[in-house]
Image (cartoon, grey):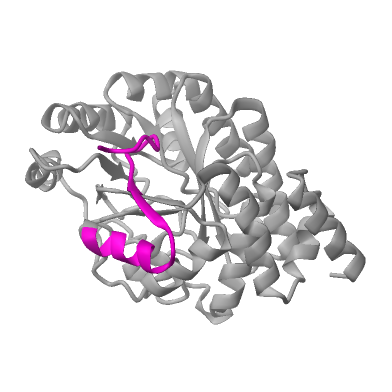
Amino acid sequence: MTEKQQHRIVEKVTHGERLSADEGLALYDCKDLLLLSSMAACPRRKYNGNTVYYNRNFHLEPTNVCVNDCVFCSYRRRPGEAGSWTLSPDDMLARCKPYVGTPVTEVHIVGGVHPQRDIYFYASLLSSVKRLLPQVAIKAFTAVEIDYMAQQAGLSYRESLRLLQAHGLDALPGGGAEIFDETVRRQLCPSKTGSHDWLRIHETAHRIGLRTNATMLFGHIETPAHRIDHLIRLRTLQDATGGFDAFIPLKYKARHNALSGVGEVSTPEVLRNMAVCRLMLDNIPHIKAYWPMLGKDVMQLALLFGADDVDGTIDDSTAIYSMAGADEQHPRLTVPELEAFVTAAGFVPVERNTFYQPVV
């Protein structure tokens, strides 16, 4: 990044002006992490002041059997393969029952795209979970799962989402976005829902009143230009609908998958990317530092590079990153532990619900 570019970008950030794609690319060339931290603090303060959000949540992962075969995935198994699981409805409800009468506010339901489970199976599951935990918001199913459900049932995206919404779906997570560039997707996940349909599903969800998140998987074979393209597509959709609550940059983890040879990006690159995401996504209010993926120490640092959310308590209920070699093999934090991490980084912890309303 030239001195002239740096001056212009700092000026635009200070005045709250939107950055261009070229300016985003220049930021990825910036070696001055302190400057990036300082710039990212501007939109962070605008949206969230000195607040860092967390929630009390747990994950429910119905299966890791999946019709897709993504080269970066350490989670997916074929039917009957060692390490595969497919939970029955009773199994899943048994995992929910310990949270009856507790302060938990969200259950996050995602898993593999199982070839023998359809939208009506998952609609019934939503109804059962909602009856058991009526006060808990259900954030469930990536756009990839929704796409498969819709195709199998012969329903439109709108009809599918309306059906799930009627059975208790409250919000969508952001998974399955990976990198939107189709040339990269053909190498990473050739059989997976394409970027156009991922964006269509989220747009449809927004139009019927479902809030959603968005993600980007980075640190594999993509380039900075691919990342910027991804961010601008999200920013454009957010301009149209305003339906994204949070964005989560997800670091590629290199163990136990077919892409392992590319290695992993460094912590400085994780922080640089966090700052660029905060600066480019000037219309998405929250940027999440997902601690089971980053680790607790890097999560704290990410708060200094634009992140304002650290996800939640998790309660050792997700295996997606553990199976890819994450340091957090049994991800679980108590509320006092989460609040201590946030406070030690110089911020004010605030418990939220799924929709970023403070829990009091």
Q: Nearer the viewer, residue 90 or 148?
A: 90
Residue 94 is covered by the magenta coloring: no
Q: Nearer the viewer, residue 181 or 250?
A: 250
Number of marks drawn: 0
Residue 345 is covered by the magenta coloring: yes
Q: Is residue 163 visible?
A: yes
Q: Nearer the viewer, residue 189 or 262?
A: 262
Using the rendered view, name the quadrant where residue 114 is placed.
top left
Q: Is residue 156 visible?
A: no
Residue 76 position within the rendered picture, expressed as x and y whole percent measured from the top left: 36, 60
Q: Nearer the viewer, residue 244 or 181?
A: 244
In the displayed structure, 321 sits above or below 359; it is below
Is residue 60 toward the left or the right of residue 78 in the image?
left
Residue 66 position within the rendered picture, expressed as x and y whole percent measured from the top left: 37, 52
Using the rendered view, name the quadrant where residue 337 is placed.
bottom left
Residue 40 position within the rendered picture, expressed as x and y whole percent measured from the top left: 63, 58
**Residue at the (53%, 65%) spot, across then down:** 304
Is residue 93 toward the left or the right of residue 172 in the image?
left
Is residue 86 toward the left or the right of residue 299 in the image?
left
In the displayed structure, 61 sits above or below 343; it is above
**Residue at the (71%, 45%) spot, across then down:** 232
Is residue 61 toward the left or the right of residue 310 in the image?
left
Quarter in which the N terminus is drawn: bottom right
**Residue at the (39%, 34%) spot, across then down:** 355
**Residue at the (13%, 43%) spot, across then down:** 96
Stretch of the chain drawn in magenta: 336-360
Quarter in which the C terminus is drawn: top left
Residue 183 position within the rendered picture, expressed as x and y whole percent measured from the top left: 70, 56
The single residue placed furthest to the right in the displayed view is 4
Using the rendered view, name the quadrant where residue 218 is placed.
bottom right
